[in-house]
Image (cartoon, rainbow, N blue to C red):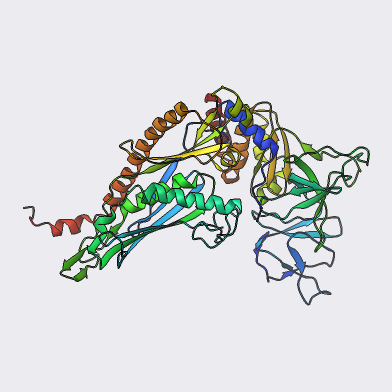
Amino acid sequence: MSFVLPGNQIQVKSANVVLGPNVDIAPGSINETVLTPTTAGMLKVKKANPQSSLYYVESNTKRYVPQINDFVIGVLFGAFGEYFRISLNSFSPPVLLNQYSFPNASKKNRPRLSNGDLVYARVSAVERNVDVELSCIDATTGKEGGFGVLSDGLVFDVKLAFARYLLFNSDAEIFTQLVKRCKFEIAIGVNGRIWIKTDDIKTTIACVNVIRNSQNWTKEELPAKIEDTFKVLKTN
Amino acid sequence: MGLDYDISTNEQNFVLEALKQDVRLDGRKLNEMREVNIKILPSEYGHVEVSLGRTRVGCKVSSEIVKPYEDRPFEGIFMINSEISPMCSPFFEVGAGGSGYGVGSNSSQANEEVLISRMIEKAVRRSNALDVESLCIVAGKKCWAIRADLQFLNYDGNFVDASCIAVMSALLHFRKPDIEVAGEDVVVYDTNQREPVPLSILHIPISITFNYFNPNGSEENIKGDLNNELILVDADLLEERLSLGSMTITLNKNQEICQMMKSGGLNIDASLIMNCCSYASKLVDELTEKIHNVLKQDAAVRTNKTEEKELRVFNER
């Protein structure tokens, strides 16, 4: 793991390379194995499969750019034709969600959604010059797979790197600490949105504050800070 | 351009439910303000940064000598520049409101920006917080022009209250260079030569914004006789977006109302407005106290003890 900037050259030993996010083949070196990052951040290397390794650059941003197969939480704010219009970011161009991209949806059996609904979905198509498209069907099984409308609960924004970290590390310290206190349902979108639902309002607020603020907490101070946040809300 | 914050129905319902239980998303009660933090930048006079939770506003006061307006020869000039740049939030567009560039533009952003600017203008300038007559140097020829530039750094609701505190503490902190008038000639002394002089501030107006919610929907407010509107102080961005109406009251320590603005929204009973006023005056007292404390601390840091001792007429023996 090292810090890289756009323009840096990353020498790769074997030709079996999987390009991850923010990494490209260096210009003029198609046959050689030289990569270059497209953004500043930490270079990470992982084994993708026994033969090849995955190269990607981890960096933190606030604005989400859709990538294929990302799990995202969007707000529905319109429908036209057979599409729903979904917003993944405030102040960003909308993306589309086909009404038939729901499990068991047909002309007779359309999903019933209204403006302002929250949807958990997968980015299914990203093409240049064409609107981004989402889907609520699991690509591997063709079934629901946890996607769909999120009802009740509360949604809030976090930084993108943090959302990714939470989504890919379900054993994250913050979660192991939080499950000791309450039961909750959670959906994490890599577009920096987290939806959480618990049994009562005060617990939800406490959970939201804990997760949002834990972006800046160290592992050691985590239990004490969680204790504080919960205590303040319970005494109120 | 029509783009707005995405607010889901989930958030809308949740906020209302939480308010009914007297909690807000950041754990405050309905009548609590966020923590006000006033920071005076040490390098110069009249540069202040105020944060209200995550809302941040900077204010820089500057002065110059100009010719007074023809119709007001005995008065100085006081201007507040409050253009909101997209730096604080993409919600605000460049030149949408404020200085009148996009007069034709009819977007809600532009309206909001104009509303914020007008409110600050009314609260501070038109309530005569700064004595403009004391800025006159030579009648009809020369006067001080005081300019307060507001920089909106981050938007999390309630710009008006934050900028009011920022402008007032910057004005209180500002020092203009000392001058000497001989006939028509004016000598301006460097700050090293003579101690600069503070502005004459007549009173400290402070704005408090209340937002209204009706737990039974806006229809009940018009038709029903219940008066159980939820009133909250210092709304953050989400609450501000979702609220059914807001009211800004500007008061000073003497309980004089300088300005009151309630543009549309829920109908509120007069008695509730009276309650708001008396509660606001309590908050204003605390905030005024806070501003004075910060200024006092800053003055203690700035005075150079040894220099002061040397300048004293009497020596201690």
Q: Is residue B129 visible?
A: yes
Decide: is A183 above or below A157.
Answer: above
Q: Quadrant of residue B257?
A: top left
> Residue B60, position in %: x, y?
39, 58
Q: Is residue B198 visible?
A: no
Q: Nearer the viewer, residue B218 or A173?
A: B218
Q: Nearer the viewer, residue A58 or B126?
A: B126
Decide: is B25 above or below B300.
Answer: above
Decide: is A47 above or below A138.
Answer: below
The residue most toward the bottom is A28
Q: How many tags in the picture? A: 0
Residue B86 relative to residue A11: left or right: left
Decide: is B167 above or below B23.
Answer: below
> Residue B131, position in %: x, y?
28, 52
Q: Nearer the viewer, residue B267 or A142?
A: B267
> Residue B172, position in %: x, y?
31, 51
